[in-house]
Amino acid sequence: MPQDNYQAPDYFDIDALLTEEQKMAREAIRAWVKKEVSPIIEEHAQQATFPKHLFKGLAEIGAFGPTIPTKYGGGGVDYLTYGIMMQELERGDSGVRSAASVQSSLVMYPIYTHGSEEQRKKYLPKLASGEMIGCFGLTEPNFGSNPSGMLTHFEDKGDHLLLNGTKMWITNSPIADVAIVWAKDENGDIRGLTVDKGLEGFTAPEIHGKWSLRASITGELVFDNVKVPKENLFPDVKGLKGPLTCLSSARFGIAWGALGAAMDCYDTALRYAKERIQFGKPIAGFQLTQKKLAEMITDITKGQLLAWRLGTLKNEDKATPAQISMAKRDNVDMALRVARECRQILGGMGITGEYPIMRHMMNLESVLTYEGTHDIHLLITGLDITGIDAFS
C-alpha cells in the first residue's frame, strides 16, 4: 500500500492569510484524503473504476454543497473554504474532486439558485447527505464550446414535458439519481430541469476506454420521449445565463483543485530528487533539477495567490465570470506544466503507478478541456479586455 507523505508547499506563507476555521477544514479534508483516497486511488485508476464507497465519506466531510445554506443540508461555509476543500480533494485525485464539484457546483448550486422552494426541499438535503447522486447535462456530441447550438429539446404536452436528445461527457451519469438537464423549449429558449432516474426512455450508458480521469465515472444522457413532470422545470431562468452561472461556480473550484494536483506532483518530485543518487550525489544537487524545482514552486506560489485573491473576491460577491475563467485556465495550464516537469525529474519511475505524477498528468489533460477549454478561456479574457467578441 503506497505511503502518503505529502507536505504542502507554502513558499509565501499563504497560511497567514487564512482563518483558523479555513485551516481546520483543510486539515480535515487532507487527513481524509490520506486515509481514504491515497491508499486505493492508484489501483482504481489502473483498473478504470471509481471507488463508489467514497461518496459516503465525501458527504460526511461536508464536500457536497459546502456553500449551500445549512437549512438545506449544506455546509454554509465561505468560498475560500470551498476552494481549499477542492484543492485537497484534487491533491488526492481529479476524479474525486470532480465528483464533489459536480454534486456541489453543477447539481446543488443550480437547484438552490434557480430551482423552486419545492425543488430545494426535495433534492438538496438528500444530495448533501450523499443519499442521492447528481449529474449535469449541458455538453452534447456536436455542441461543447458552443452550447447555444444544443439540439436537446422538450415540448409541453399539457400535463408533462416530453424530452428528447443526448448529452455527452457527463461525470457520474451512469450512477446518478437525478440529472440537471439544459434543453430548449418550443420557443428555442434554453431551460433547466431535473430529470429523475428511472423515467421511461431515460438511459445513461457509461463511456469506456478513457486514458484520463480513469478513477471517475463518465457517461452519456440519452432521452427518448421521456415524460418529465412539469414541476421539474426551473421556474424562472432562461437562456445560457442558467448553465453559465453553474459553470462559473465549477470553474472556481477547478482553479483551486488544479493547485492541489500541482502541489502533489511538486512535493513528490522534491522528495524524490533529494533521495535519488546519481553521479555520487542527490539529483536535487544538479543545476537543471534545481531550475525545474525553482520554476515550479514559483508557478505554484503565483497560482496560490491567484486562487486566494479570487476566493476573497468571491466572498465579497465581486468575482466576475471573466476573473474566474482566467484563474481556471491559468492554474490548470500551470498544473499540467508542473506535472510534466515532475515526471522528467522522476525519469522512468515517473510513468509508474508507484508515484502519482502520471495519473495527475493524464487527469489534467481532461481538466484543461472540461468546463471550458484552454482556448475558449483565452477568448473569454480577450473579450473582457477588448470588448470585441472573437467567438464568431
Image (cartoon, rainbow, N blue to C red):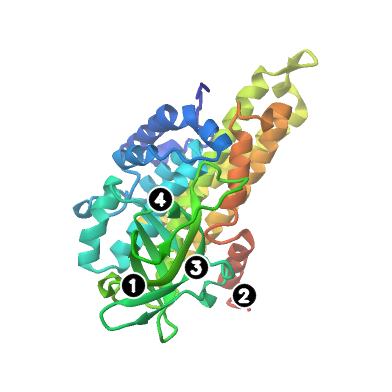
Mark linked to residue 166: 3
Q: Give me the C-alpha separation between circle 4 and circle 1.
A: 20 Å
Going from the N terminus, do you reach mark 1 or mark 3 first?
Answer: 3
Of the residues tagged 1 and 3, which is closer to the observer?
Answer: 1
Looking at the rendered image, the quarter that the C terminus falls into is bottom right
Residue furthest to the top in view is: 280
Residue furthest to the right in view is: 279
In the displayed structure image, the side of residue 110 where residue 294 appears, left or right: right
Residue furthest to the front in view is: 200
Q: Looking at the image, can residue 59 be seen?
A: yes
Of the residues tagged 4 and 1, which is closer to the observer?
Answer: 1
- The image position of residue 266, as x and y in percent, is 60, 33
Of the residues tagged 2 and 4, which is closer to the observer?
Answer: 4
Q: Amino acid at mark 1?
A: Lys
Of residues 181 and 32, the one drawn nearer to the viewer in this rendering: 181
Q: Give me the C-alpha separation between circle 4 and circle 3.
A: 17 Å
Q: Write down the residue under mark 2.
A: 391
Going from the N terminus, do you reach mark 4 or mark 3 first?
Answer: 3
Of residues 360 and 287, the one drawn nearer to the viewer in this rendering: 360
Q: Give me the C-alpha separation between circle 2 and circle 4.
A: 35 Å
In the displayed structure image, the side of residue 184 where residue 24 appears, left or right: left
Q: Give me the C-alpha separation between circle 2 and circle 3.
A: 24 Å
Indicate the quadrant where residue 211 lies: top right
Q: Looking at the image, can residue 297 be seen?
A: no
Q: Write down the residue under mark 4.
A: 175
Check if mark 2's residue and mark 4's residue have beta carbons within 8 Å.
no
Q: Residues within 10 Å of mark 2 (few under 14, many from 20)?
A: few
Q: Write down the residue under mark 1.
A: 227
In the displayed structure image, the side of residue 288 where residue 328 appears, left or right: left
Of residues 158 and 353, the one drawn nearer to the viewer in this rendering: 158
- The image position of residue 113, as x and y in percent, is 31, 65
